[in-house]
Amino acid sequence: MIDIRSQFPILTARPGLVYLDSAATSLTPTSVIDAISSYYGTLSSNVGRGLYATAEETTSHFEAVREQTAKFLGADADEIVFTRNTTESINLLASVLEDRIHEGDNIVVTALEHHSNFLPWKRLAGRRGAELRIVPFGEDGSLDLQQARGYIDSRTKVFAFSAISNVLGATNPVAELIRVAKETNPNILTVVDAAQAAGHSHIDVREWNCDFLAFSGHKCFGPTGIGVLYGKEAILSTLPPYQVGGGMVQDASAEETAYKDSPHRFEAGTPDIAAVFGLGAALDFVEEVGIDAIHGYESTLATKAVALLHETFGNDIQVFGPTSTRQSGIVSFTLDGIHPHDIAHILGEHDICVRAGEHCAAPLHRILSLPATARATFSIYNTEEDVQAFIEGLKTAVNLFRT
Amino acid sequence: MSSLYQAVILDHSKHPRNCGLIDHPTHHGESKNPTCGDSLSLDLLIQDDLISEVYFHGHGCAISQAAASLLSEVIKGKPVETALALGPDDILSLLGVELSPNRLKCALLSLETLKKTLASDSENKV
């Protein structure tokens, strides 16, 4: 494999850093940092209207990244809306769908969801007098087709679920879930939260047949400040604007406003242009390494870590999600007698970065009856030495609390 | 590197003092720290403006548990006025460590619960 670690300057700047919090945000390769810097250093113009060289170049590169993002998802460029992050993508969608939801309708989400794919739907249902239904997850942490089917009926307007749980790390059968949902109700709108999948696992919106999909740049080696909302052209083009203002109108007067077509209709105001440039470089990085290679490497490393956790800590450790073979780099766990925050803090004192808490998935933790879990995420730049350091760090924590 | 997990904190988190419930407390209060999922409840027995009994219980990280244990020792047998005068710096000096803003919330959960319990006197009186 190409030398991955040398492409991440933070690993040189901070020798000894064991970064295992990539489900929160991934590290950034040099090419992405350079793309951001090159925008400010050589172009520094706004997108859209300028008739001079740097403005035209900025616009054409900006739109080229839209094309690239479309290709990355298996979509067309006019189906790609740039947002700030997954959260904004889903809030945008929930907001523009408001007129379509009526009293007596229902919205179906799952108990696995991150707050960003839960609260916008909960609020929308509340505002429109609709019912929010929550599909439970199975013991292995993934969604069951037949169970999901039971929650969907002729009044279901939206079915929103994540491709990969940000806590349990299990991969859901996205295409099958959508097929089952549309068999039950052909008019249902399906929304896939791909925040943990993008850049780490294969995505194809045509193959999946999802109506909408959201992801963030910063979880797939890109910068913060850039998110994507994919929407099927036939649906996106019928939806009203989200925010109104600059860059999204054809014409405006006191009497009338003519909005641009999608996707520009949904992109009011100057976007984070540098972040879009950075996203382009991140998608190049993913393509260069290969999505299957990334997915294989991360899942294999996580599987090894889980085996070592069981081997080292026996009955004292509880690992959530798929039992043996992991399907992503995400591993959440608890250790008997040590609060997850203390685990994260002690590891942090050894420069090992893991997360502790609810990981923005309070409903899931309520169901598991856990106040918190600790989470380690294994990404493409992590090594077997990192796994070893992680295990040693946990041993230190155990020794501190057991002696 | 100086660890946050000093002997005092480990001792009090592993063997918390005054941990439990009072059958008929004169004052009761509860608090939660949503960032950690720490929760704490506090029972007080106050007679003639004197805190004669104090018991806390809850679950949370070592810092929140140790702080509650240390605080309970300080206020037991003291006038209410003394408890009311306690501030964040007193808790930090009891713990004997420096804390990041995130962990500060864990450390101060018990103090917050105490203030709440004492302030909402009539409401929480059992």
Image (spheres, helix red, strand yellow):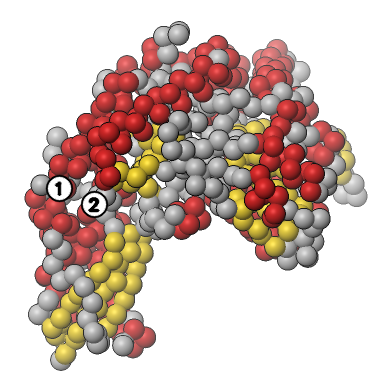
* Residue identifier under label 1: A402
Kindly identify which chain the residue marked by label 2 belongs to: A
Q: Tell me where residue A28 appears, x and y as whole percent.
A: 45, 23
- The reply, left or right, for residue A156 in relation to residue A1 is right
Dot 2 falls on a residue whose secondary structure is loop
Can I make out residue A159 in this image? yes
Can I make out residue A266 in this image? no
What is the C-alpha distance between the residues marked 2 and 1?
8 Å
Asked whether B86 or A393 is in front, the reply is: A393
Q: Tell me where residue A56 appears, x and y as whole percent.
A: 72, 16
Dot 1 falls on a residue whose secondary structure is helix
- The reply, left or right, for residue B69 in relation to residue A308 is left
Q: In the displayed orientation, state which residue is furthest to the right.
A: A255
Q: Which mark is residue A335?
A: none
- Asked if labels 1 and 2 touch by Cβ distance under 8 angstroms, the answer is yes
* Residue identifier under label 2: A337
Mark 1 burial class by Cα count in 10 Å: few <14, some 14-19, many 20+:
few
Residue A86 to residue B38: above or below: above
Q: Tell me where residue A284 appears, x and y as whole percent.
A: 58, 15
Q: Tell me where residue B13 appears, x and y as whole percent.
A: 17, 57
Residue A254 to residue B89: above or below: above
User: Residue at (60%, 41%) from the top-left corner?
Assistant: A162
Q: Quadrant of residue A130?
A: bottom right
User: Residue at (55%, 35%) from the top-left corner?
Assistant: A171
